[in-house]
Image: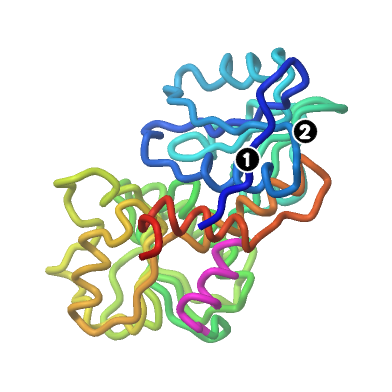
Amino acid sequence: MSHTVLPAINAATRLCAVFGSPIKHSASPAMHNAAFAALGLNWRYVACEVDPQNLRPAIAGAQAMGFAGLNLTVPHKRLALELVDVLDPSAKTWGAVNTIRFGPPGATGFNTDADAIITALREDLQLALPGARVLLLGAGGAGRTAALKLASERVAELFLVNRTQSKADALADEIRRQFPAVKVSTAYPPDDVDLLLNATSLGLQPGEASPLDATRFALRQARAVYDMIYRPAETPLLRAARAAGCRTANGLGMLLYQGAAAFEIWTGQAAPVDVMRRALTENIYGPAQ
């Protein structure tokens, strides 16, 4: 892969960052810095470990220091709803903030995840979502956004499974109010589904338990499995799903499309998506041989 050289950092360099905990796995800096270089922008993007209890001062500090914007990842997307000055309709609709833009009228929170997950599911798994039956693992920021967006795409049935039952119940109630045509339950499905979607962080760290209770649902009952985690490139869940004969994909596509939308929000320029995809692929899978 040929690399475009970024201009030297100087007093005019604009900064962006991603806040999360954990954050060392993030491929976002590789993607965004490649995009800045491709367009000749004197910008830089960094990853910062931010504990949830420090999220408010971290956002305020970035704003005070003149950052152009932020991305937020686990576990900050729901917390940030109360920490920005303005909520874009995307954040209001999907109930989570993964992108912040600084500038008049202040810190504005956006959600670029919802559209990204649908684009990734269609591209990577060739899924027709209307009428589909979906098992969704996780009801946190990413899971809630995915559930609401899938319901808006007219899936037939959603099975919501979450470690904290009350969160799954609250999300199910919200979907029933907003999308009454979608059948929702908070238990494992009794038979086959078109898609199993992991929106938890389980699988991000070595040795973590599977997000799926295999005693209650067998992977062979899922036609396709999508894991929002992209590093490792193949989580234990995806490895087991591939062995069970499922179509599989990791979260690279979702990361790409949410990042491209964030890039455009911050810079006002069209994102060089092909450049960003190549940078992500090399960062996650290694240089092409």
Q: What's under tag 2, amino acid-wise?
A: Val
Sequence-wise, which precedes: disc 1 or disc 2?
1
**Where residue 276 appears, x then y in whole percent?**
59, 55
Q: Which residue is mark 1?
A: 5
What type of secondary structure mainly makes up the magenta span?
A: helix
Q: Could you classify mark 2 by the number of other residues whose Cα lies within 10 Å: few (under 14), some (14-19), or many (20 or more)?
A: some
| Mark number, residue 86 | 2
Q: Nearer the viewer, mark 1 or mark 2?
A: 1
Residue 57 pos. (x, y %): 58, 14
Residue 240 figure quarter: bottom left
Which residue is pictured at 28% across the width and 62% down the height? 234
Secondary structure of residue under mark 2: strand
- Residue 211 x, y percent position in the rendering: 25, 56
Residue at position x 51%, y 82% in the image: 156
Q: Is 54 drawn above or below residue 98 in the view shown?
A: above
Please indicate whether residue 228 sits to the left or right of residue 220 in the image: right
Which residue occupies 69% across, 28% down?
Answer: 84
Specify the amino acid type for callout 1: Val
Q: Identify the mark at residue 79; answer none if there is no mark.
A: none
Q: Is 41 displayed left or right of 161 in the figure?
A: right
Q: Which span of residues is magenta-colored?
A: 116-127
Q: Is residue 167 magenta?
A: no
Residue in the foreground of this view, choosing between 227 and 30: 30
Q: Residue furthest right?
A: 104
